[in-house]
Each structure stands twice: as C-alpha cells, then as structure tokens.
Amino acid sequence: MIEFFQEHPWIIIALVAHGAVLGTVAYLILLERKTASWVQDRIGPNRVGPWGLLQPIADGLKFILKEDYRPASADKVLFSLAPCLMIIVIIISIAVLPWGGEHQVTRTIDVTGQTDARLAAISHVPSVGVMVGEPKIEQIAATTDAGEVMAPARTLATVTYRYPFQIAKLNIGVLFILGVLSLAIYGVVLGGWASNNKFSFLGALRATAQMVSYEIPLGLSVLCIVIMFGTLDLGEIVEKQVSYWGHVIPAWNVFTQPITFLMFLICIHAEANRAPFDLAECEQELVGGYHTEYSSMRFALFFLAEYAGMITTSAVCVALFFGGWHIPWLDKIWPALSGGVDPTNPSITTSLTVCLIRTFAFFTKTVAIIFIFMWVRWSLPRFRFDQLMMLAWRALIPMSLAMLMVTTLVVYYFGTEGNRAYMRVGGKMAVALMIGNVAVLAGTMFISKLLPAPPETNRRVRVIGSRFNRTSVAAG
Amino acid sequence: MPYTLTESSQDLMPFTSGNGPEGDNRWTLNFGPQHPATHTTLRLVLELDGERILRCTPHIGFLHSGFEKLGEHLNYNQYVTIVDRMDYSAPIYNELAWHGAAERLMGIELTPRCKVLRTIAGELGRLQSHLLCVGAAGLDLGAFTAFLYGFNEREKIYDIVEFMTGQRFHTSWTRVGGLNMDLPDEAVFKRMVHKFIDDTLPRAMQDVETLLNKNRIFVDRTKGVGTVSREDAIAWGLSGPMARSAGVARDIRKDEPYLCFADNWDGQGTKAVDFKVPIMTTGDVYARYLVRLEEMKQSIHIIRQLIDNIPGGPVNVSPEGKETLPPKDQVYSSIEGLIHHFELIMTNRGFEAPKGEVYYPIESANGELGYYVVSAGENVPWRVRTRPPCYINYSIFPKLIEGHMISDVVAVLGSINVIAAELDR
C-alpha cells in the first residue's frame, strides 16, 4: 500500500489539496462574515461553537436540509448542470498549483530476480517523477558465518528521483489555469439562462460580457510575467523568484511589476465576480442575478465555486507575484528551506517536512490575498455596467498592453546580463522594470489628460416617444 | 357612445409591442413589489432596451392601509397611534404634524417646555431618517458598510427616544396640548443627548463621509444621475432635500415657522433657533446625499442650542383647558380631577373640536408633511387628509429614471427615500 502511494505521490497530494481547499472554503465563508463584522462594527457569528467556529457546519447542514426548488419553467438538465460545471471547473484548476517545489527521494529497491535490473528499478520511479542520474545496482551476496556465498544473491537498486509537490506539473500551467477558469462562465450563463427568469438572464448576460472583457487584461498581465521568465510552468516561475536582490529584498515579481500586479488583482476580482464587480449577482438590482432561482445544494455549489475560485485565483496570484512557497529571510537562517540540493534549482529539497512547510507558507499567502478580496468587498460600492466596461476597455487593456511592451523591451535589453543561473531577474533588470512600471503609470496619467474626455456615462439618453417631452418628439 | 382612448390616455396604458418607433425590441421587467431594493413594496414596470430604461411605470398602493379613513373614527388623541405608522423611518414627525394641526384647529398655544422637547424630538427624527437614507445611498450601490454605520447611530437615537417617550419606535408621544409624559429625568436625558451629538454621531458621520464622499465609484455612480431641474422641482411640487438639492430655497422651518423655529416662541421674546438651510443646484443623487449630510449637521446644531436651555414648567397646557389629562396626583386626590380624567378617557366622552378646517405643514425629513383637518364640531375629525412628502416626491420618479440604466433605479429610488407606508397610507 505504502509502496503504491510512494509510486503515485500525486494521489495523496490531490486528495489532501482538494480536501484542504474545499474545507478551507467553508471556513472562508466564516472568515468573510467575520471580516464583514470587523469592518462594520459588529460581533459577527459567535453562536455556534467557540467564536462561531462551527458555523460553517451549521451553514452546510442548512444548505442540505433546505428545499431543493426548481421552477417549473426551468430547463431541467441545464438547470442542474450549471452548478456542477462551475464546481468541476474550479476543482480541476487546483491541479497545477505548485504547493511545495520538488521533492527529491532516494529509494533502495529490491530487484532480485529481474532480468533487467535497471528497467525494473526505473519502473519504480513515479510517473510524475524525474530520475536523477542512473540507478545504482549492486549485488549483495548474503554470506554465511563461514564466508560461503549463499545463493541466490540479492540485487538492490538505489534510485534517486524527484517529483513535483503538486498534483500535476504541466509545462503549460498558466495557460491551463486561464483556459479552465474561463470555462466557469458557462456555469453562469447556463444557470442564468436555464432558470427562465428575467433577473437571472440579465445577470448571466452581464457576467458574460464582464468575464470576456476582463479575461483580456488578465491574460495580458500574466503574459508580462511569462515573458520575463520564458516559461508557462507555474512551478518554474515560483522557483525563479526564490532569491534576493542585495541579499535583502526578495526577488518577487510584485516588486518589479507592481502595476501588473494591481491590474492582475483587479482582474481576478472581476473574474471571481466579487464586489465591486459583482454585477452578475448584485442583490440590490437583480435580486440574486444568475442564481436567483437556485436554492439548497444547487445554490451551495455556486457559492462554493465562488470561494474555491477565489482560492485558485489568489493562489495563482501568489505564485506569479509573491514568490509562491518562498519564505523570505527565514531561508537565510535555515538554507534547507530553499533547496540546498542543486545550487541551480532552489525548489528541490530532500525533506518532506520542508515541502509541507512550504505548502503552509503558500497557503498562508493565499489566504492573505483572499483577505484583501473580503476587505475590498465590504468597503466599496459597486460599479455600474457601462463603467465596468469602460474600466476594462479604456484603462486596463491599454495599460496592460503598455506594460507588455515595456516588459518585452526590458527583457530584450537586460534579459541575459549578469544573471545567476537560477535567477532570471537580475538587479539591473529589476531596476529597469521598476522604472518601466513608473514610466507606464506616469505615461498613462499624462496621456489620459490629452485624450478626449470619456463619454458622460451618467448622461440620460433622450427617449423617443417619452411621455415627458412630447413636444420634442413632434420636432424630431 | 363607447369609451374611446384619446392620445393622452394612451400614455397611461401598458406598453404593447410594436407601438412606437423602437417598440419591437423592448423588454418588460417587473421591478418589485418583492425586491430587495424597493425598500418596501413599490412596484415598477420597466420597459428596457438592453439595460437602458425607456419607460418606467410605477404602481402604488401595495401598502394601502386606510390610514386616512381611520382618522374619521378615532379622536384627536387616538389617531396619533395611526399617524406614527406612516413614515416609519422617523415616526415622531407624523406626531408633531398631526397634533400641530389639531392644536391649530383648537387654537391651543403650547408651553415653552413642550415646544423645546418637541423640537428636539423632531430634529432627532430628522437625524434618524437621514441616517437611514444616507446609509441606504451606500447600500443601494452595494456598500453595505455605510448603511450599518448609519444604523448603529439609529440604535442610539432609539435609546434616547425610549428614555424620552417610553417607546423605541412608534412612540405615540404627543397629545393635544402637550405630551404624553414629561422627561423622567432631565439630567440623564441631557447627558444621553450630549454624548450622542457631541461624540458618537459626529464620529459615525465622519466614517460615512470618508467612506463615500470622495469614493470614485460612489461619485461616478451618483453624479449626474436622476437630475431634477429647478423648474421641475417647483412644477412637480417637490419639497425637502429633493427640492433643496435642485436649488429651491424652501424650508418650512424658515418659511412658515413653527415650534422653536418661530421668533418669540416662549412668549418672552426669545429668538428662533439658529440654523442654515443647505442648498445645492445640481439636483442629482449626489447633491441629495450631500444636502442630507449637511442637514444632519444643522440638526445637531439646533439640538445643541436647545438641549442646555430646556425651560422649566409644565409640558401640558393648563388642565383647565379640557383637552389635556390632569396630573395623576389630582386624579387620585380630588374629585374634580377624577371626573376630569374620566370625562376624557371614557369612550363616549372626550373633548370636541370647533368647526372649521385647517392645514398645518411641518418640515419633515423628506419634505413638507402636512395634515389637512376638517372638523364638523365633533370629537372626531370629519375628514383627515395627509400631504405626504414621499408621494409627491415619488411622482417625478418615472421622469427621472427615463433614459438611465437599471442600476440607476436603485440609486435614484434610494435618494428620494420613498417610504411606502406613507406613500400608500
């Protein structure tokens, strides 16, 4: 049994990661309610269990016990399919998150009696692992006390391999996440359409336009990071941030690409349908938006998907901008935290404990980003639909294009100079990127003054045939 | 001859597809009466082109409770329990207006102490209503936090009102010629009010202002939305913050002063309380929000002038007048007092108002709140008519919202502060 899991470590990681993420979702809802109460001078849930810690269980029970209502005019299949689609998509996207670098293992395997000892040894390397060096094969002759060789001798193979401490290490990880997350829109659209409710339908329409628009600046800001590192693998992007500039500042992208980070943060707010971008489900206008007609577990799935989506996008944000599992400064004291096995690749570690500590650090950072989500939600009013579109098309997309250009130029001129092997962004390049960011910001502010004023969106459109200006109808 | 529709009556008909130049692609959306943002039970039938509102038809009457008819069956003191229920965002106003009208009908001049207490209560009511509306301005745009900051302070007003009247919400505090009861303890009352207006309320207002006033999203959502012109405001008879934000300098407290807003209110030549009437000219949702905030500051200013100078003396006019109940010690110790008490309390007794008709307006939080009372010389009014600010202010809503988007419906609706109970009565 243990052998089986040693050869398929991703199964355990997948089970634990999904369990942890979905369990965290329940507690994120509690965190959200607590955050709201901190912001709003309230106490928040404190009835169920100490400090309300059992509240998520009570919430979950309530969801299960509520009547599962479906409107008679709803499309039966799609109505049930939509929430499933939402949650499946989010669960899939967790797969490529790099929780803890790479784990290097050395195992000794008994391959006695195999015709090809080497092949037999290799067959024990996990499918997701990479073998380091050749397996060492030695014949151990068991001897008697008198020194006589007893037949048959045992053959032992020592094989060293690394496996990524994540569910699946894809070399197109970033692309995979972007692609899978954009499938979530189908859940919203189908749910809104299948409900056969005007409010749901409006919510679904809004969500479609919003998610499609915000995917562009999201993709462009991710592209800046991809260009800097020349890889789409999230694990590799994290690995290349594990370093320091001047031995003090962690080489995280948030310091070299602050504008990109802000744009990314705004876009994941919009992608997660969270305030101030929660137009698809805004209570004050559309009752519940696309999930107006949902109740019980079907609603709970939408609800879970929203929070799980927040975890995924925040985790991607941590991986791209905050050095993933990197624990700054602590690895000066305890170098094993950042490798020590291969000087060119700090992500490799031989200790499982280190992997777990890294996972914990990664998760803590993710929750910190999620806290920003909640903080924003309880502080800001929401946009109106046209203002939302203006923000994407007039501000975010041009700015992210400019950022992309600046990043490309910097990488072209400074990309290869004086970088250590495991560190893509050298000091010079970092400074150049910082200057580039400031330049883009200043340039945007300057150009926005020169551009013609944006259309006055609060303007009232003259309605033809209005009851209130009948005379003007006759005129034109 | 059968009834035929004229062109103007066709405007009142629900829209049918194909009518009008862009008729075919309109989409009808029923906004309410069960809807989170219609505050109570308002129903709007919106005709949409995408998200753009081409026509809005409000349907009212979902909360009609026959309040005015009840006024013809309850005597002048009993009806106060009904008027309380009209504008429930600040119930005390309805009482002031109702008994103001009754007292004007009977020619009763209140005691100075009663006037001061009623004025303070009225301004507390204004704070109460404006806190709700200012908070709701945030709530309707999705900023729930500002709403709760306002509601925290409303709780403190409830505490003060409870101490003052014995009831937190529907106080039924006023009586013809005075009040139900005097303050139980003046020192405690002063301390509570001082703590509220000097400490907690300014802090909460500061919180709301920093959260919303310069918030780019909030300003973008409210500036230029639901604009009322000065001419429209006058033509549609708007009052209160709706009119003042559109540049109409009308405030009943200044124009037709009552209680402590009139000069020489205590008969000894005291000047009227000092306050300013905030005016803005843009007339949009943002202007209404700012006008309300400033009015709250003026209300604090008014309370601050009065709270330390509450005159002594009785709160009710002399019990020789037949309208007010005699003090309890008289009831228990003298036969005249007891008879007087029973004369007022027993069902077929009570006092009669003189014949006549009278209109008495006050400046409530939402505008001019007036009662028109016709008396046939009986102990109940012959007819009571309310002039509710919400009803008149709401009438311009279809015009304001036409050509805007769905999201603006809630913003404009919140800024009018429609109280459906008062609107439908």
Image (cartoon, coloured by chain):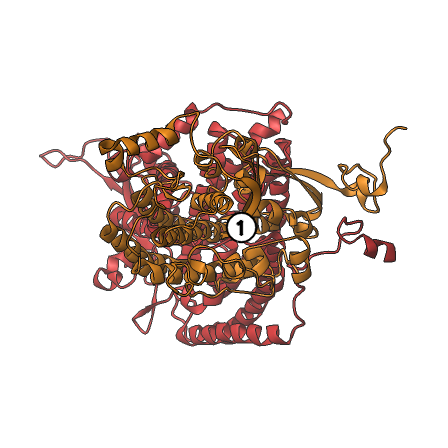
Q: Is residue B225 above or below residue A200?
A: below
Considering the image in quadrants, where does the C terminus of chain A appear? bottom right
Q: Nearer the viewer, residue B369 or A62?
A: B369
Structural crowding at the residue carrying mark 1, measured as other residues with C-alpha within 10 Å and reported as few (<14), some (14–19) or many (≥20) = many
Considering the image in quadrants, where does the N terminus of chain A appear? top left
Which chain is painted in red?
A
Q: Nearer the viewer, residue B275 or B233?
A: B275
Q: Residue at x 38, y 70 (%)?
A: A420
Query: In which chain is the residue bearing label 1?
Result: B
SS type, badge 1: strand
Q: Colour of chain B?
A: orange
Q: Nearer the viewer, residue B96 or A156?
A: B96
- Expressed as whole percent of the image width and height from the top left, the position of residue B345 reads 37, 29
Residue that mark 1 sits on: B361
Q: Is residue A438 visible?
A: yes
Q: Nearer the viewer, residue A109 or A335?
A: A335
Identity of the amino acid at label 1?
Pro
Q: Is residue A137 visible?
A: no
Q: Is residue A268 above or below residue A410?
A: above
Q: Is residue A142 above or below residue A439?
A: above
Left or right of residue B144: residue B405: right
- Expressed as whole percent of the image width and height from the top left, the position of residue A431 reads 43, 76
